[in-house]
Amino acid sequence: MEPGWNNGRTTTGDSVKSSWAEQIIELSVFLFLIVPSMVLSSFVVKQGTLNFVVVAIATILRDISLVSLIFFFIWRNGEAVSRIGWTFKKPLREAGIGIALFIPFFSGTVFLENALRLAGFSAPSRPLPSFLAVKGVAEIVLVVVLVVVVALAEEIIFRGYLILRLKTVTSSPAAAVLLSAAIFSLGHGYEGSAGVVTVGVMGLVFALIYLWRQSLFAPIVIHFLQDFMGIIVFPFLGKG
């Protein structure tokens, strides 16, 4: 048994002394913080009123704050951080699995989004929103930092934390996976309905890999490579 953080609460296997009511209140507070901002960001981005530096810094600070809140919740409940997949046993093997899965993952997402567009789902009005237009060396460094932070934070948030808490609240791992994927897709309204559905499916795949590996390492690697290709490589090649 992996011990939880010693803060006055104890863990027994996967159980903790925080009640179901306490966990649903905790989850409600977290969702109240994250969901409105994700939905609002989709509408703001559509207006094209933001620039890259503002969005990047705001996103980095938001994600760091949310991850800090998650680790506070875990500490408060006396839980082991491995319960949210924060375990990096055999990192080279897990990284290799992530890299190996990325090619079929990336190809599958491209095929799915193109198929959805052909089926009549809406596409974004331009390949990339204007706030993702990166200029100069400083902004290139910033976008790399952004991609790293987003990959780490979103996997902790949507796979590690939300699946853990939603399983408790719903008593259904399947419902937890579906709900976490749906919430994950909310912040991508600027990509059109095809993009939103594709991101939701990506969330499902990330969740399945996470549950299979019992670690966030491989999903983080795939998530990083996906964003790196879409935000940095393709725009640099003129294909974004």
Image: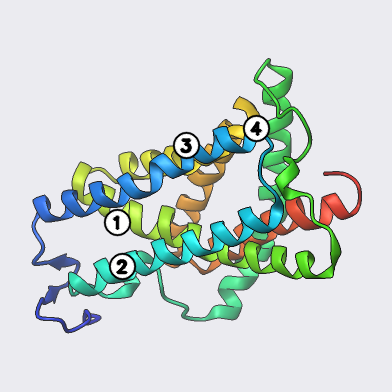
Front: mark 2 or 3: 3
Q: Which residue is mark 3?
A: 39
Q: Hey, what amino acid is under mark 3?
A: Val
Q: Are marks 4 and 1 in contact (CB under 8 Å)?
A: no
Q: Specify which label sits upstream in the sequence, 4 or 2.
A: 4
Front: mark 4 or 2: 4
The span from disc 4 to disc 2 (Cα, nearest Å) is 39 Å
The span from disc 1 to disc 2 (Cα, nearest Å) is 7 Å
Residue plotted at (30% across, 52% down): 30
Q: Specify which label sits upstream in the sequence, 1 or 2.
A: 2
Q: Position of residue 4 (x, y in %)?
A: 21, 79
Question: With 149 as the anchor, is 186 left or right in this view?
Answer: left
Q: Hey, what amino acid is under mark 1?
A: Leu
Residue plotted at (78% across, 70% down): 138
Q: Which residue is mark 4?
A: 47
- Quadrant of the rendered structure where residue 22 is? bottom left
Q: Residues within 10 Å of mark 4 (few under 14, many from 20)?
A: few
Q: Which residue is mark 1?
A: 164
Q: Please state which of residues 28 and 203 is positioned toward the viewer in this rendering.
A: 28
Q: Which residue is mark 2?
A: 83
Residue plotted at (27% across, 75% down): 80
The span from disc 4 to disc 1 (Cα, nearest Å) is 35 Å
Front: mark 4 or 3: 4
The span from disc 1 to disc 3 (Cα, nearest Å) is 23 Å
